[in-house]
């Protein structure tokens, strides 16, 4: 029996971060204020364990929200020590931390290894020097390269976090960033469209006309390209879009930008739309089209409010489209039937045909 993966999130807020990035108000983004203590860590773990069926679970503690390894070493140790009894008892399987690329050195590595941290995610955001400068990131692409090399040498699972649509960013720069990261062979990735959050420098830039965020449609297009690039190169994209918090959902914290509570679904749905268009590119005069899909993929293939079906019907001039759920169809695979023709394709195969065309213009 496959065990379900559970993450116990511990938020360390803006703690440890030496820079004020233009996009960042960490308290607003995470929906959590204040700094976690050793007691807070134990309380959070115990609170979650009461709801997790341990016999069928793989449980991980993740320190999110700040630059963990920029915190003073004694404070890092205090937080990590709180998890150790659960690690030693086999209750907690992994510890994950998130940090800046310029906050990784041998002293940090030794602490992380001592306290059995297995996964380190780096807030890369961009590998473009101008984007990093305009965003006041305070680190360089070389810092990313050096941090990944050091972490890889010592056996950590490495994650990279990319933010698209920052000041000075373009589609081409985002593509270049991911291509450079792929060369470093990370294990996992997250993709975040930049949002204008209250009480940030980017909010001031937005109101003064110095910055324009991506539209939702533009963000989906960029994220789609990056998702395909990462996954074609065996980098697992574990998240697309900011985790919704109550304040963000209610519109209290996001001033502007492409927020959507189901960003990944929009991106994957867009891939399916392109895939069906590709599969039908040589078809002529289709009166009725059957789409057969695995039940788990049905909502992604239909698109929100059946937008994909409406798009294919209108653009291919098809009179009738019928969608069937079929458990014998592999996940992430579509079978199209029209007339005497049957066409089957998986996303994995489709991405081998993918071409990044028209990406050199500014978004």
Image (cartoon, helix red, strand yellow):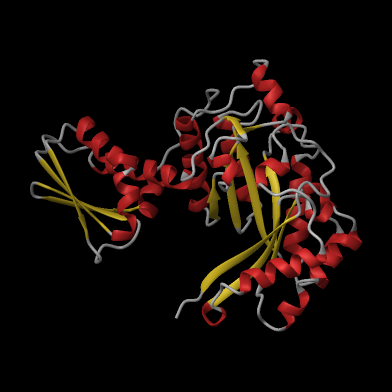
Query: What residue lies at 85% left-to-right and 54% top-to-bottom?
Result: 71
Q: Residue furthest top?
A: 209
The quadrant in which residue 171 appears is top right
Pick the quarter of the image with the N terminus.
Answer: bottom left
Task: Give the quarter of the image for residue 18.
Answer: top right
Question: Residue 248 location, x and y as percent?
Answer: 58, 40
Left or right side of 98 for 7: left
User: Quick check: can you spot residue 170?
Assistant: yes
Q: Is residue 49 above or below residue 232?
A: below
Q: Quadrant of residue 83?
A: bottom right
Image vertical order of residue 80 relative to residue 20, above or below: below
- Residue 155 appearing in the image: no
- Residue at 72%, 78% (x, y): give it: 86
Give coordinates of residue 128: x percent, y percent: 69, 34
Q: Name the residue nearer the viewer: 227 or 93.
A: 93
Q: Position of residue 63 (x, y in %)?
A: 72, 59
| Horizontal and vertical percent position of residue 360 | 53, 26
Front residue of 344/160: it is 160
Name which residue lies at 8% across and 49% down. Answer: 340
């Amino acid at each position: 029996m496959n065990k379900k993966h559970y993450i116990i999130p511990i938020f360390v807020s803006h703690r440890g971060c030496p820079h004020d990035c233009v996009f960042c108000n960490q308290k607003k983004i995470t929906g959590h204020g204040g700094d976690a203590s050793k007691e807070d860590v134990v309380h959070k773990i115990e609170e979650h364990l009461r709801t997790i069926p341990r016999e069928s679970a793989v449980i991980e503690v993740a320190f999110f929200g700040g630059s963990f390894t920029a915190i003073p070493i004694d404070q890092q140790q205090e937080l990590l020590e709180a998890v150790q009894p659960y690690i030693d008892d086999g209750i907690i399987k992994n510890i994950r931390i998130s940090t800046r690329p310029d906050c990784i050195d041998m002293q940090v590595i030794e602490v992380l290894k001592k306290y059995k941290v297995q996964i380190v995610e780096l807030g890369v955001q961009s590998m473009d020097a101008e984007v990093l400068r305009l965003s006041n990131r305070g680190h360089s692409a070389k810092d990313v390269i050096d941090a990944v090399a050091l972490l890889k040498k010592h056996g950590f699972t490495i994650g990279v976090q990319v933010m698209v649509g920052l000041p000075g960013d373009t589609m081409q720069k985002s593509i270049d960033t991911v291509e450079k990261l792929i060369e470093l062979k990370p294990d996992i990735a997250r993709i975040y469209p930049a949002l204008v959050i209250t009480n940030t420098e980017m909010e001031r830039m937005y109101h003064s006309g110095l910055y324009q965020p991506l539209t939702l449609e533009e963000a989906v297009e960029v994220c789609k390209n990056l998702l395909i690039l990462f996954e074609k190169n065996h980098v697992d994209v574990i998240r697309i879009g900011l985790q919704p918090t109550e304040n963000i959902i209610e519109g209290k914290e996001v001033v502007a930008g492409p927020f959507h509570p189901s960003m990944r679904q929009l991106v994957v749905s867009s891939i399916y739309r392109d895939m069906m268009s590709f599969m039908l590119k040589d078809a002529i005069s289709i009166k009725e089209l059957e789409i057969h899909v695995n039940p788990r993929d049905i909502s992604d293939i239909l698109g929100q409010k059946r937008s994909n079906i409406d798009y294919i019907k209108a653009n291919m001039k098809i009179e009738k489209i019928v969608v069937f759920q079929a458990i014998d169809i592999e996940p992430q695979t579509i079978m199209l039937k029209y007339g005497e023709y049957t066409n089957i394709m998986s996303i994995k195969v489709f991405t081998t045909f993918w071409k990044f065309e028209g990406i050199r213009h500014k978004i």
